[in-house]
Image: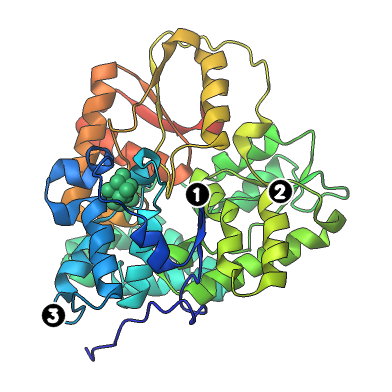
Amino acid sequence: MPYKKPCLDPNSPKQHLSQIISEMGTRDIYSSVSFCSRCGSCQQDCPLYRLDPQETNSPRGRNQALRLILEGKLSEKTNRSLFAKMVEDCTLCGKCTRACAGKIPTAEHMLELQRALHIKRLPFSLQTLLQQHAKHPSLFSCLVRTGLLLRRVGAIRILELMQFTRLPAFAWLRRANKLLPKKIHSLNSLFRKAEIPFTPEKPGCIYLPSLEAVYFLPDLALQTVRLLSKRPPLILTQQASGLFAYVYGDLRQSRYAVYQLIKRHAKEKKGTLPFVTDSIDLYNFLKKAPQLFTAWPRLQQKANRFAQKVVFIADFFPKKPAASSKQLPVLLEKSALFNQEGPAVLSSEKFLLTLFKKNLVQCFYTDAEIPAFGYGFTCHNKAEQLGLQTAQVVARSQAKTVVTLSGLSALEANYVLRRFYPAAKAVHIVQAD
Ligand code: SF4
Ligand code: SF4
């Protein structure tokens, strides 16, 4: 493969974030990475460092590597495989940012390095499929539905028997097959049966279902809409969020997708409606939408207005829910992309505490980590080890229900629990009671 010189130039804002917005302010990539004081307070919070305590596995090591590249003291050409491993291994969980006094956004630094070195995290076939989500949402929808139909008639099983899924490019099919529920209903027919319109006459909010809610967990979308019944939602099932392009693809595609969302939001009641999502990952990403547009001030203003309206579904839970009859412990698993704290997590905790009272077991940040979607496709062994740790935490707490804040975390957690601790089951927070 021809060598492409990395470009981390903040003056090339199309391929890179020219400024990264963190809790401590807005900085370009070099300032952001230079603010890492090398104190090491984040080390023990990083799930990867705890698995294999080496400096190259730590948030501090990752930040220093990037700083040295930017200063021209480390050659990206001769150390490419090491950098690629540092990037690929990072689960983007943001636990290091939570532990860091300077709130250094290491996950975002790793994504910048990934873009600069043109690293593709996912197998080519899956990467190509996911890229369509931002570029051609209808084609993506058609491809996924065809894939699900073929799975239903046993095509994946046949491919497995023919050893086709042993080819590295298609090994992800085997994992995806095990990860997804056996029976998947169609979102459209579910909503038709429940007589829920996608476009109500007077929408009270806009709901962007996560990708998993549209294709793999339509019950999750249905329950979310029921929670929103007092403010009938305008449901956007065909619009890409830009999150997958942000993590796995091209920043330009991600920016384009978010721009479409901003326009769509502004079209309804002059952008005053709450913009609801059922995924904490999506929430964290959309809240940071302004950083995609720092090189375009007018667009950034619009993105700022949009980001203020983004809310997680937990804000629509009843304030005084009837106490649950569940007598066994329930464990809250907070895995999220980029950050695991903030108002969305707090309101989720508050709701679950009211619902389950002393039966709720809080999962400490260092206890367990359900890696982001796609991680298991590239870092299979590490995902297995992290999954096993999570199952051990659940088993120690004797919980029978694990509550997650995104549908993908619930899918990943169930995949792990089925194998290591089948007594427990994971559900998304809207399905918790
Ligand atoms: S990322 Fe933060 S906590 Fe970690 S070494 Fe740097 S300054 Fe310290
Ligand atoms: S984002 Fe998560 S995996 Fe990556 S360095 Fe930080 S704590 Fe470690």
Pointer 2 residue Cβ closer than 8 Å to ligand 2: no
Q: Which residue is mark 3?
A: 78
Q: Which residue is mark 2?
A: 309
- Frontmost of labels 2 and 1 is 1
Whole-number angstrom distance, CA of label 2 to CA of label 1 = 22 Å
Q: Nearer the viewer, residue 56 or 335?
A: 56
- Precedes in sequence: disc 3 or disc 1: 1
Q: Nearer the viewer, mark 3 or mark 1?
A: 1
Name the residue type under label 1: Met
Q: Which residue corresponds to the image point at 39% horizontal and 51% vertical from the top-left?
A: 104
Q: Which amino acid, mark 2? A: Lys
Residue annotated with mark 1: 24
Report the quarter where the N terminus lies: bottom left
The residue most toward the bottom is 2
Secondary structure of residue under mark 2? helix
Which residue is at 46% across, 65% downward?
246
Query: Which of these two is toward me, 127 or 166?
Result: 127
Using a 10 Å C-alpha cutoff, classify the residue at mark 2 as few (fewer than 14 neighbours), some (14 to 19) or many (20 or more). Answer: some
Figure check: 421 above or below 143: above
* Residue 51, x across and y down, in percent: 15, 43
Q: Amino acid at mark 3?
A: Thr
**Residue 286 vs residue 184: left or right?**
right
Of mark 2 and mark 3, the one earlier in the sequence is: 3
**Dot 3: element:** loop
